[in-house]
Image: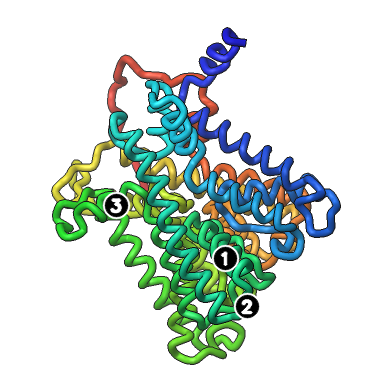
Amino acid sequence: MRTRAPALLERFQHPAQVIVTGFAAVVLLGTGLLMLPVAAESGESTDWVTALFTATSAACVTGLAVVDTASHWSAFGEVVIALLIQVGGLGIMTLATLFTVLLSGRLGLRARLFAQAETKTLRMTDVRTVVRKVVLFSLACEAVVAVVLTGRFLIGYGEPFGRAVYLGVFHAVSSFNNAGFALWADNLMGFVTDPWVSLTIAVSVIVGGLGFPVWFELLRDWRHPGRWSVLTRITVWVTVILLVGGTLVFLATEWRNPRTLGGLDDPGKVLAAFFAAVMPRTAGFNSLDISAMYPSSWLVTDLLMFVGGGSAGTAGGIKVTTFGLLAFVIWAEMRGEQSVHVGNRRLPESVQRQAVSISLIGVALVAVSTYVLLVLTPFSLDRVLFEVVSAFGTTGLSTGITAQVGVAGQLLLVVLMFVGRTGPLTLGSALALKEHTRHYQLPDEKMIVG
């Protein structure tokens, strides 16, 4: 047995391979647990497609569901879902690194590399500290949100203490990890004008979606914005722009829609529109009926879901940093500059290639998956595109067709959620046996572009 373990580890030459394998293992374990009769409210075993879809959606912190979470799953099943969300949010390698530190007090080179790939730290010597901060920060934020929600459910809605705590903890975990699972059939539509619930969950989603490196820097240098790194500056400003812009667009588009904002008073409209702009960060909560929105609002939501949230956090999508960097690349090209500058820093060409690659891979996956789902289902393009982007961006919002796309369609969404969580480049590098380095340069060739 001792000789087999090292041989097995040697098969994984790249940290990305372990990350992908770890997420796959968690999904399979979650599927098995959710298939147990005790996991269902009816006491009968859940079919494997439903269990696989739910486990993938939870571990990949998406929120799409083919069955009603509250009525189908028992307390055991809901706890399994919450644990899958927690593991998926923190990251397989983050938890594995934490356990290694606690059990042995030592951290080998291979474990440092794996944790570095998962947490996106810049120096290997920081891995142990970062992992500890990630876990403590996550648990602290979830605890604060759980206390606020528990108090609101207890005082404002007369829930028994045990039930209020259960609801508070579950939705704190689900919101901070940008999962979007809720324990009501209409998600959070019953709290559309309740600022205690809506704003608390919205803030939790934003905090979890900004990314751990950004928060560590903000907590350290929040008084000195001039010292912020390019990562923090782009993440913060692009997030603010998208949140403000999204809120204004939803207000303008849905203001008179009687099925969404039209029936609310003015403060309620602003709150609901802000909540609708936050959730594509990428959490699948909704306080408005998504299926009742105008197609123009669906399109805006598609764009927000595709961009997603911050890097190295709990959000999905191509990330706001990627989106922001592409804007600087385009601006530099329009000005005819030889290099791309962000503030007083030059953007390396490797980072530019990564941003372009992630974006184009994302576009390709969404386009191909949309075509396939259109072939497999009778639904219109706008609804199918919304579903595909939601799965790829690990958002979880839906126009209500998730349970009706059939087994083949649901399996396609499972793949999209998995790829969206592990990342196109991470998945691609995990499938590669080894990296190739070109030891020579070919002559330049001028091309006509555009």
Going from N to C along the chain, the mark reached first, 2 or 3, is: 2
Whole-number angstrom distance, CA of label 2 to CA of label 3: 36 Å
Front position among marks 1 and 2? 1
Q: Is residue 250 left or right of residue 130?
A: right
Residue 303 at least partly seen: no
Coloring basis for residues: rainbow
Q: What residue does disc 2 label?
A: 292
Q: What residue does disc 3 label?
A: 330
Image disc number at residue 165: 1
Residue at 48% x, 38% y is 95
Residue at 84% x, 54% y is 43
Residue at 56% x, 75% y is 153
Residue at 57% x, 38% y is 23
Q: Position of residue 449 (x, y in %)?
A: 35, 44
Whole-number angstrom distance, CA of label 3 to CA of label 1: 49 Å
Q: Position of residue 4 (x, y in %)?
A: 60, 11
Q: Quarter of the image for the N terminus: give it.
A: top right
Q: Residues within 10 Å of mark 2 (few under 14, many from 20)?
A: some
Q: Is residue 423 above or below residue 170?
A: above
Front position among marks 2 and 3? 2
Q: Residues within 10 Å of mark 3 (few under 14, many from 20)?
A: few
Q: Amino acid at mark 2?
A: Ala
Q: Position of residue 321 (x, y in %)?
A: 34, 51
Q: Position of residue 286 (x, y in %)?
A: 56, 70
Whole-number angstrom distance, CA of label 1 to CA of label 2: 32 Å
Q: Amino acid at mark 1?
A: Val
* Name of the residue lying farthest toward the top: 3
Going from N to C along the chain, the mark reached first, 3 or 1, is: 1
In front of the other: 310 or 291: 310
